[in-house]
Image (cartoon, helix red, strand yellow):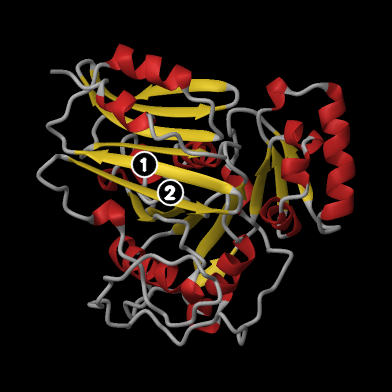
Amino acid sequence: MASDSGKILAVPANVITGFLGVGKTTAILALLAQKPREERWAVLVNEFGEIGVDGSLVTGTASEEQGIFVREVPGGCMCCVSGLPMQIALTQLLRKARPHRLLIEPTGLGHPEEVLRTLASEHNREVLTLGPTLTLVDARNLSDERYTSHPTFLQQLQIADMVVANKSDLYQPADLNRLESFVQKRCKPSVTVKITEQGKLEIESLVGEPGTCYEPGHPHDLDLDLDLDLDLDLDHDHEHDHGNDNHRAPTLVADQPLPASGMLSASNSGEGFESVGWRFAPTEVFDRADLHGFFQTLHVERMKAVFITIDGIFGYNKTRDGITEMEMDECAESRIEIIAATVSPQWESELLNCRTA
C-alpha cells in the first residue's frame, strides 16, 4: 500500500502453491471475485512453460479497470538465477498497481521456498508483509509415489501454513485419512487443513502470520530495491540451472513479437516433465469443435489454453479429471501450453488443423 510519502509499504502478500493440476488458478479467481470493490489487487504468476497462459486466463475474466493487475514470469524461472526475474516482475507490478494485496502463484514444478526467501529478503521487507502460505493438494495423489516422492511436492507441503484439500467432491473416504496422516508426518505442527472443492477459498484464509520466517542473508538474496533501474538488457538464452549466479534475466518468449508466419512455439523441461506451447496471431481463428476433438486425444499431465474461435473467446483447462471450458471477455491472442512426461511431435500439426480456413 502507498504511504503519504509515496512509498509502497507493507503490502499484504500470500503465496498460493501446489502441484500441477490441483486448481491454483481457480482458487485465485475465487479469491479475486471477493476483492473489495475499492481495493487494488496484484497477482504475480509463474508458469513452467515458456508461453504463459495463466495471465491470459485471469485477465480474460478480470481487468485493471476492476482493480486487478496481473504480471507473468513464464518459463519456470521465478526462483532461478537468484530470483532476478521474479524481483524485476515484482517491482514492475508493484509500481504499476500500488496494490492493497499481492497474490503469488509459483509454478506447480517450482521451488516455493526460494520464492518465499526472495519475498522475505531485506530489500522486500518494508515493501511486503507476508501472510500465510496456502498449499493446494489433491488428496487422491497421496497414493501415487510420483507425487509423494517428488521433492517439489514435499517442499510445497513443508512450507504450508494452510493445506487446502481441493477437489474434495471427488475423494473417497480413504483419501482424507491418507491426507491427515501425510500432513502429520510432513507438515509443520501449526498447519491448518481446509477441505474444499472447485478452489473455493475465503479472503479470511489470507489473513494471519506465516509460520516460517525466512531471514535475509541467504545466498540467493539480491541487493535490489524498488528504485532499481528496470531498463536492463534482458536478451539471453533461457537457463534453468539454479546454481547459475550471473544474474542474467531470461528472454521471455511470451513477450517476443510474433513472426510473419503468425505462430511461435517454445519448449521447456525439468523436474521430470516436458512442456511445449504455441502462440498464434490474433488473426488466426480456430474451430471450437475441432479444438475439443484435439483436447480429447491428449493424455497429458496438464493443458491450459485460450483460443479465439468462430464462436467467441474461450479458456480451457485439462487435468486428469477432464476438460473445463470458460467463456472469456477478451484475449490478445490464442495461446496453449501442454505439460507431459513426454511431448509428442504430432501435436503441432494436429493443432494447426484446428484453424479455420
| 10 Å crowding of disc 2: few (<14), some (14-19), many (20+) | many
**Quadrant position of the C terminus in the picture:** top left
Q: Residue at x 48, y 65 (%)?
A: 240
Whether residue 10 can be seen here: no
348 vs 36: above or below: above
222 vs 316: above or below: below
Front one among 145 and 23: 145
Quarter occupied by residue 179: top right
Where does residue 319 sit, x and y in percent of width and height? 55, 29
The reply to whether the C-beta atoms of the residues labelled 1 and 2 are less than 8 Å apart is yes
Q: Residue at x 30, y 28 (%)?
A: 349
Q: CA distance from mark 1 to mark 2?
A: 7 Å
> Which residue position is annotated with label 2?
49
If you read the primary sequence from the N terminus, does the residue marked by circle 1 or circle 2 appear first? 2
Where does residue 172 sit, x and y in percent of width and height? 80, 21
| Circle 2: residue type | Gly
Whether residue 177 can be seen here: yes
Q: Residue at x 64, y 56 (%)?
A: 133
> Which residue position is annotated with label 1?
277
Toward the front, the furthest residue is 345
Mark number displayed over residue 261? none
Considering the numbered disc 2 on the image, is that residue within a helix, a strand or a loop? Answer: loop
Where does residue 275 sit, x and y in percent of width and height? 46, 44
Considering the numbered disc 1 on the image, is that residue within a helix, a strand or a loop? Answer: strand
Front one among 19 and 132: 19
Q: How many marks?
A: 2
| 10 Å crowding of disc 1: few (<14), some (14-19), many (20+) | many
| Circle 1: residue type | Gly
